[in-house]
Amino acid sequence: MPEDLHLLTGPTSGVVHLPKHLDWSGHADYDLDRPGRIVDLYRTVINEAATPDDLHTYLDGSVLRRLWSYMWLPPQTRRAWENRFAELAQLSRLASA
């Protein structure tokens, strides 16, 4: 998990190729200009990141905030991130209101 969402400065457009330790599915190219693929990339990186550097490299803080409330994550993962970052918890609360 990153120390701060501002440290997430990954790409926001174009095609991103994830390394095998993050995506071994054989479909590791993500076109960030396609809404469904950017959500897939964020979900994959959040669930599979081995180090904070993986998160810093592939995620962007403002994009994460935009996707957060409707991106499916395992409950324990979502809870851990929302416990760490109050702004993400607030986004979830606002979306469910």
Image (cartoon, rainbow, N blue to C red):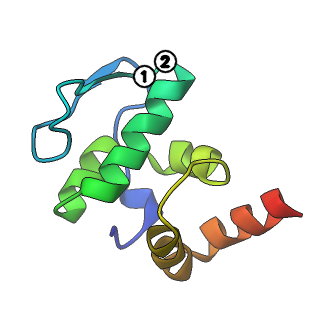
- At horizontal 71% and vertical 64% (from top left) the residue drawn is 92
**Lateral position of residue 94 relative to residue 45, left or right:** right
Residue 51 sits above or below residue 45 on the image: below
Looking at the figure, which quarter contains the N terminus?
Answer: bottom left
Residue 6 at x, y percent in the picture: 44, 59
Q: Nearer the viewer, mark 2 or mark 1?
A: 2
Tag 1 secondary structure: loop
Residue picked out by circle 1: 13
Q: With 8 as the anchor, is 95 left or right in this view?
A: right
Residue 33 tag number: 2
Q: Earlier in the sequence, mark 2 or mark 1?
A: 1
Name above or below for residue 22 compared with residue 49: above
SS assignment at label 2: loop
Q: Residues within 10 Å of mark 2 (few under 14, many from 20)?
A: few
| Res 20 → quadrant | top left
Three-letter residue code for mark 1: Ser
Residue lying at 89% horizontally and 64% vertically, measured from the top left? 97
- Between residues 53 and 44, which one lies in front from this camera angle? 44
Residue 89: x %, y % from top left: 65, 72
Residue 22 lies left or right of residue 65; in this view the side is left
Q: Residue 48's spot in the image, x, y percent?
A: 25, 55
